[in-house]
Amino acid sequence: MTLSTKEIIALGEKHLLGNVTRIPLALVRGQGTKVWDAEGKEYLDFIAGIATCAFGHSPPFAAKVIAEQATILWHVSNLFWNEPMVRLAEKLTKVSGLDRAFFCNSGAEANEGAIKMARKYSLERFGSGRHTIIAANNSFHGRTMGALSATGQETLRAPFEPLVPGFTFVPYGDFEALEKSLDKSVCAVILEPVQGEGGVVVPPMGYLKAVSDVCRKNSILLILDEIQTGLGRTGLEFAFKHFDLKPDIITLGKALGCGYPAGALVADALPASALTPGSHSTTLGGAPLAMALGLELVNNIVEPTFLAEVRQKGKYFLDGLKKLAEKIPVLKDARGLGLMLGASLTKPAGPVANNLRDHGFLVNATATTVLRFVPPLTVSLKEIDLLLEALEAALKEVYPEETC
């Protein structure tokens, strides 16, 4: 018997850790851009597992791949080769222009691998004392100890100190501040091409290219965290392709498995050579079931026609948000790339997200005053219009004194 929302929440509150503030909503079914709660209410999902469900919920082609692979081989550990793993590695290296791939189970795990790779490579090439990694204020790279150590949000870091040493933080988008931090102890820079948890912050034009150039000039590795931006989210295979550069290392997660646990670290040959046998591994990474699914998903995502549609829908959505900002003062601005968009308010965004949920739309409030929109890449223009209409009504209802 299916439990009610109230019963599901009560059971969870009794038995789950209280480490997450969950929305008081129990979802039991999804199809495409829609999800349903335990009482059967329908919602349009503009969160998509936090930019994870690139093809929406329960895409039939993905379900078919899982079902087929499940009858063949699930897991063998990385003590052995398996065909889906090497085929997905071939695909990711070809599309990214990098040389080697390592598979794991999450984006945070991928960032852990990137941190280890950067430090070991620098130690072997330049000797000791060159281990500092520069990261950005307001960044988010994960919640494991190494990834958290690279995360530039003090409220997340402070309760777990002392963290892994050797990280320096600079303002995101400020090239001069970053350049001044490049002393002889620096082995790598880690950045998000667009900050996600930090409020969908797009860097100034030329910033990432300048960072790439100065890193290359000083033999410093550039790690781009493409966990949220990668695999079609911004309308290209990877966000770095918008900025005329080639990183040394990229990290992936989220859309790689579209909800099934999967992460990847993809690197140029030189830094990749540092992770020799015994230096890094994971029991579940590269499992045939996840890899077969990932390969099918990536093959569909990187289709030029599909990516062009993402760019078109992203522009349509962003234009709609900007037009709304011209009409409603509480909506300060809108920004983003592709279908990774943010609407910045002059007031807290949480009450607006709650209002939208009451009216059948799921959106995420982040960085206190930002509404983040990361719908399935398959979202339609009609569904975007419905969201924009609902957002206008929500802003007027929640902040009537600010929308006159």
Image: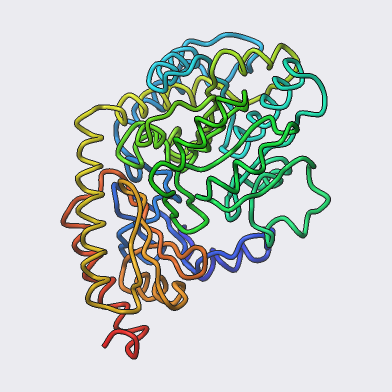
Say which quarter of the image contains residue 279: top right
Depth check, front residue: 296 or 174: 174
Q: Can residue 166 be seen in this view?
A: yes
Q: Residue 274 at what x, y percent from top left? A: 68, 16
Q: Is residue 15 visible?
A: no
Color encoding of the figure: rainbow
In the figure, is residue 392 to the left or right of 355?
left
Up-down: is 352 above or below 136? below
Question: Where the C terminus falls, by quadrant?
Answer: bottom left
Q: Residue at coordinates 70% horizontally, 19% vertically from top-left? A: 121
Depth check, front residue: 94 or 278: 94
Q: Residue 359 at what x, y percent from top left? A: 31, 73
Q: Residue at coordinates 35% horizontally, 45% vertically from top-left? A: 57
Q: Residue at coordinates 30% horizontally, 44% vertically from top-left? A: 377
What residue occupies the far left of the structure in this picture?
382
In the figure, is residue 150 to the left or right of 61?
right
Up-down: is 265 above or below 83? below
Q: Residue at coordinates 63% horizontally, 18% vertically from top-left? A: 77
Up-down: is 80 above or below 51? above
Q: Residue 337 at what x, y percent from top left? A: 33, 47
In the figure, is residue 55 to the left or right of 286?
left
What residue occupies the far bottom of the structure in this picture?
401
